[in-house]
Amino acid sequence: MATATLNIDLDALISNWRALDAETACETAAVVKANGYGLGADRVARTLMKIGVRKFFVAVAEEGAALRQAVGPDPEINIFGGHMAGDTDMISDMGLTPMLNSVDQIVRHVEALPAHPFGVQLDTGMNRLGLEPAEWAAVRNLVIERNPTLIMSHLACADEPEHPMNPRQLATFHEMTDGLNVPRSLAATGGILLGSDYHFDLTRPGVGLYGGMPFVEAAPVAGLSIPVIQIRDVAEGETVGYSNTWIADRPSRVATISAGYADGIIRAMGPEISVFAGEARCKVIGRISMDLIAVDVTDLDEAPSHVELLGQHQSVDTVAEAAGTIGYEILTSLGHRYARRYRGG
């Protein structure tokens, strides 16, 4: 088999959700946008439903519609992107709950679906989505009269616990929402770890569920096993890969493995990344190409049939650092060519 295998540990997913839930005294939802951070929103959501999760968040209505078909009529599916033009029928037919982000979205929703549930997103300083304080003050009474399901905002710097932006946004959120008899949510994974002041009525962990930072204690959920296609002997002074970027400084054995940047193994990782054959670390050499990667296996006692890129030996954030990016990008870039194997759950 020449297809790399993405192993997804649903028991680790459950463990991570429970650990984050235990940090709070409020309800804990789950963010499953971007196809469950690349791991399969349908399987992720159905697994979490078994342990009592009843509220999910996705980015756009199309993701919500696909999730609804996977999980059935009962869970609440919230749409961060709100009620966009053209979404009305999908929101209505699929029972989705948009988080309204602007006066235009509020008007669109109230006119098109006056009795349909909705929430509101406020901008407390991130300047990305949500109503700014002056806009919120202008429409607040109208919105509250219609009984929103949730008022939420999003922290910009929650992965940096000492960042002054965190208490600043918390104070703004209080100013905009205190005294309103509506459930509130401010914390995703990083906000949960900031402590109870940030938890309010609902938390909505995302990347921490899937083994990513800033949840240091997270169990790894994604494991990537890549088959070896060929092993060759390379003489001292010979080169490997495009542009001759690696030159053997000794007689070497080089394994070519079946994955590349088309599978989300970002080209920039190149010389900074390793794979593992059992417990042995093997350096990636030369350029990562579209479908193939070269690995130095000279020091192994026997030729491996597979190597591990992600898993117990190397986290998504370690791999991300090598590429100059973040774990979110690694997870959501994991390619469609992988054979996905689920265990546990």
Image (cartoon, rainbow, N blue to C red):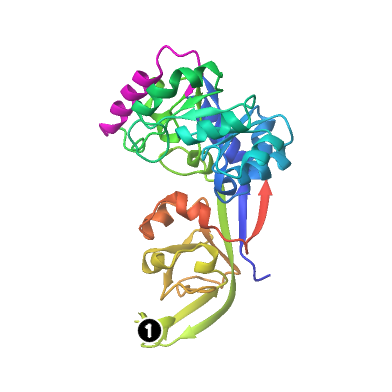
The foreground one among 307 and 262 is 262
Expressed as whole percent of the image width and height from the top left, the position of residue 215 reads 43, 38
Q: Which residue is mark 1?
A: 244
Expressed as whole percent of the image width and height from the top left, the position of residue 103 reads 46, 32
Q: What segment carries the magenta color?
A: 162-184
Quarter occupied by residue 47:
top right
**Residue 10 shown left or right of residue 214 in the figure:** right
Which type of secondary structure does the marked residue at label 1 adopt?
helix
Residue at the image position 31 percent from the left and 22 percent from the top: 171
Which quadrant holds the C terminus?
A: top right
Is residue 39 one of those drawn in magenta? no
Q: Is residue 35 above or below residue 160?
A: below
**Residue 31 shown left or right of residue 137 in the figure:** right
Residue at the image position 42 percent from the left and 11 percent from the top: 179
Residue at the image position 49 percent from the left and 20 percent from the top: 142
Quarter occupied by residue 60:
top right
Residue 93, visible in the rendered structure: yes
Q: Is residue 188 above or below residue 43?
A: above
Which quadrant holds the N terminus?
A: bottom right
Q: How many marks?
A: 1
**Residue 41 shown left or right of residue 307 in the figure:** right
Expressed as whole percent of the image width and height from the top left, the position of residue 88 reads 63, 39
Residue at the image position 56 percent from the left and 58 percent from the top: 224
Structural crowding at the residue carrying mark 1, measured as other residues with C-alpha within 10 Å and reported as few (<14), some (14–19) or many (≥20): few
Expressed as whole percent of the image width and height from the top left, the position of residue 154 reads 41, 33
